[in-house]
Image (tube, rainbow, N blue to C red):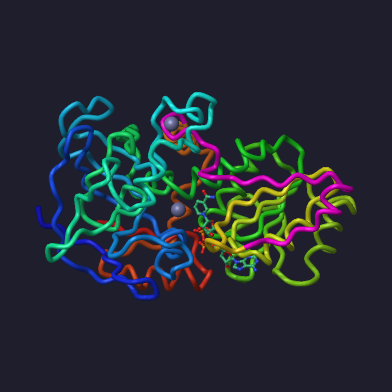
Amino acid sequence: MQIKGALLLRPGERFVIENLTLQPPQAGEVLVRIAASGVCHSDYHVMSGTTQHPMPCVCGHEGAGVVEAVGENVSRVQEGDHVILSWAPDCGQCFYCQHGKPNLCDTYVGPIWAGTMLDGTTRLSWNGQPVYHYCGLACFAEYVVVSERSCVPVRKDVPLTVASLVGCAVATGVGAAMYTAEVRPGESVVVYGAGGVGLNIIQGAALCGASTIISVDTSAAKMAIAREFGATHTLAAGPDVHNAIRDLTGGRGADHVFEAVGVPFVQEESLGAARPGGTLTLVGLSPMGSGTNLPGAIITREEKTIKGSYYGTVNASRDFPLFIDLYQAGRLKLDQLVTREYPLEEINTAYDAMLSGDSARGVIVF
Ligand SMILES: NC(=O)c1ccc[n+]([C@@H]2O[C@H](COP(=O)([O-])OP(=O)(O)OC[C@H]3O[C@@H](n4cnc5c(N)ncnc54)[C@H](O)[C@@H]3O)[C@@H](O)[C@H]2O)c1
Ligand SMILES: [Zn+2]
Ligand SMILES: [Zn+2]
């Protein structure tokens, strides 16, 4: 079938809207009509080239839609199901899946980073040449063909626009607080970066019962938004931030610090916001091949812990429906995450808005 999609031809260029050819789903695959796709910074890393990826490609990894057709031997979903797409499909059988870490499943890492379906081929093409799928998804397009392993069926009474955000920002952020860092009631939390991911760390920390939640961002517009999501204090990023954080945390620093920007110097700076014995959780994706220079002597003497958090340590099949239930129960704010909806044709404008630092999340709505 012919579909409209946002194509990235080369790193450093902007998206171009093109007619693409999409093959029908093969065995174990599903055709999904995309309803909405969130504008995450990780796609921008592909656009800017800080994440290397085969090109031309279609990005978009924060999507939700409706199953239109299924290939042979599909058992997870059926036609008409509402699904949230997972950008890290898990096999259920490998070492990581069997040890409670399906977010680290290594069975499909090869094809995912080769930009293909799980069998190593693409379903998308343009002018006769293959087009690669980011994360096995490619949801900046009207339709996707994905593995059934990328599909998590969810209840139908939730708008797909907000459901799409569960597929990355909500899972990554709320999961980082709940599962990676395991924030406890009464603890203090600092979050560097209040974008789609950081705001969800803030609301995840609030859900876990943190009593002091400090949001640090360079954008003044983010202060009010961060408070809406549960920040008790907001600070402008800069040299005085550590002193201000200590003033708010009994002179010690915070129990938990999260970096949700993805810049090595911010990762380095954020360690100083954690108290002795505290934990720094790295959520932002720094450029591939970059290094972060952390002070070993302080980490040892002050017993600080540094953790990575990938996809919020979630189990997508278990947690996407849970986050949707928490939204329906009024415990997670998803409507407020959507600053603005854009048609696919305005995807470059949506990315400009993300880079300005003023919006919570832009969403492409089909
Ligand atoms: N670990 C994972 O599994 C995972 C999943 C999704 C996204 N990410 C990464 O998380 C990061 C954030 O993604 P996002 O979509 O929320 O991005 P975003 O662009 O929406 O938000 C980034 C925020 O950081 C702020 N910021 C910029 N420089 C800053 C500084 N020096 N100090 C404090 N704040 C600063 C910006 O103003 C903005 O509010 C990206 O690197 C993204 O690739 C990681
Ligand atoms: Zn696995
Ligand atoms: Zn993302």
Q: Which residue is situated farthest in the left direction here?
A: 1
Compare residues 234 and 97 and report the one nearer the observer.
Answer: 97
Compare residues 300 and 325 and report the one nearer the observer.
Answer: 300
Determine whether, in the image, residue 203 is placed left or right of residue 293. left
Residue 42 pos. (x, y %): 46, 59
* The quarter of the displayed image where residue 220 is located: bottom right
Residue 180 pos. (x, y %): 62, 39
User: What residue is drawn where x is 33% and y is 58%?
Assistant: 59
Is residue 339 positioned above or below 177 on the image?
A: below
- Queried whether the magenta region covers residue 299, the answer comes back as yes
Residue 299 pos. (x, y %): 82, 50
Q: Which residues are magenta?
A: 291-318
Residue 292 pos. (x, y %): 67, 61
* The quarter of the displayed image where residue 17 is located: bottom left
User: What residue is drawn where x is 19% and y is 54%?
Assistant: 124
Is residue 342 positioned above or below 278 on the image?
A: below
Determine whether, in the image, residue 229 is placed left or right of residue 210. left
Is residue 192 positioned above or below 154 on the image?
A: below
**Ligand 2 quadrant?**
top left
Determine whether, in the image, residue 180 is placed left or right of residue 330. right
Determine whether, in the image, residue 200 is placed left or right of residue 271. left
- Queried whether the magenta region covers residue 254, the answer comes back as no
Is residue 258 positioned above or below 292 on the image?
A: above
